[in-house]
Image (tube, rainbow, N blue to C red):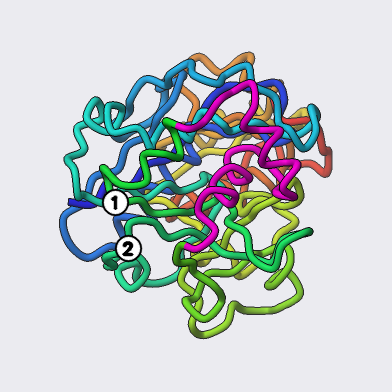
Amino acid sequence: MIHFVTFKWKSLEYRVRYEALHANILEAMVRRHWRGDMRFVTITDDPQGIDGETFPLWSDCAQLVNASGRHLPSCYRRLKLFDPEQQAALGIKPGERIVSLDLDMAITAELNPLFDRDDDFIGWALKGSHHPRVFNGSMWMLRAGTEAHVWTDFDPDKSPGEARQAGFLGSDQSWMSYRLQSRAGWTQDDGVYSYATELKRFDAPPANTRVILFNGFNEKPWMPTVRPWVVNYYRGGAAGRVLILGYAETVWQEAEKALDKFDFDAVIASPEAAEHWPGELFAIVGDDAQAEKLARAAGFEEIVFCGRSDRIAEAA
């Protein structure tokens, strides 16, 4: 069995807001591109809106700041996936594969060539600032029951600084890079790419692309500023017709006509419209372009937009 795992937690530190929808889209992409038995679980402190299986997020290392800078995200808590006891609590048996995936990624092709491997650990390998090769925490695979030292040797008071002094940057990824330097790694040759540093300038991904990671603080696959081709791959499993409620003063007159004419499977709303919508919302989005992008990414076959305007606002 292979267990795909992602994390979603509420945090005021992040410049990007992650929603249940992003977990749902990621699961849909994984299921679309994996051949064989699998399990997908979101480890979270906020399961509302997540369609698939969830597991309660542990508090270990929750208050630990990133040794590379207090202003940077801290993901040390993800290291507990290396703990055999935590693996057992998750229902993972020794020898089974655990794949940790970030929410901000797009999957373009079959995943089996990446994960049908016998390595105890394999991670996304990149050139580092101080080392020729480091692991990025966006995607890695672990054979359950192996490499437990990554967790058991981790001292919250000393280990972050130790990895930083050795020239490894980040939070969990710095410690993994420090302790797992000799392990296997995926590169562009395997079809694993960074959007920001390798694909942003192109009109289509390379033919061998399997996974695109949106690491860093810049664009994410659901944002309207990314290249138009991204939405061909970053999409969920939703279907049917979605109503989008925008900012224009005519939004409710248009919505009344649309509701008389159609049945809707979901509603996406601006923050203002969301305050007055009496039912459940699929998402709250801060501008027209992003609302449409999100609707397409979710997989809706028909979009009805009411109250379209050029206004751009902060997402709620």
In the rendered structure, which disc, 1 or 2, sits on the residue that comes first in sequence?
Answer: 2
Could you say which is closer to the camera, residue 308 or residue 185?
Answer: 185
Q: Residue at x 51, y 46 (%)?
A: 102
Expressed as whole percent of the image width and height from the top left, the position of residue 155 reads 55, 25
Task: Point out the image quarter for the C terminus.
Answer: top right
Asked whether the beta carbons under mark 1 and mark 2 sit within 8 Å of each other, the answer is yes
Residue visible at 66% across and 33% down? Answer: 160
Image coordinates of residue 145 in percent, x first then y, are 26, 42
Question: As shown in the figure, which amino acid type bears the numbered disc 1?
Answer: Arg
Which segment did they paint magenta? 153-182
Q: Which mark is residue 119?
A: 2
Residue lying farthest to the bottom in this orientation: 207
Residue 111 position by quadrant: bottom left
> In what element is the residue under mark 2?
loop
Amino acid on which disc 2 is placed: Asp
Residue at x 39%, y 56% (from the top left corner): 121
Secondary-structure class at tag 1: strand
Q: Residue at x 70, y 60 (%)?
A: 226
Classify residue 157 as left or right of residue 155. Answer: right
C-alpha span from label 1 to label 2: 7 Å
Residue 193 sits inside the magenta stretch: no
> Could you say which is closer to the camera, residue 235 or residue 296?
235
Rate crowding at label 1 as few (under 14), some (14 to 19) or many (20 or more) other CA atoms within 10 Å: many
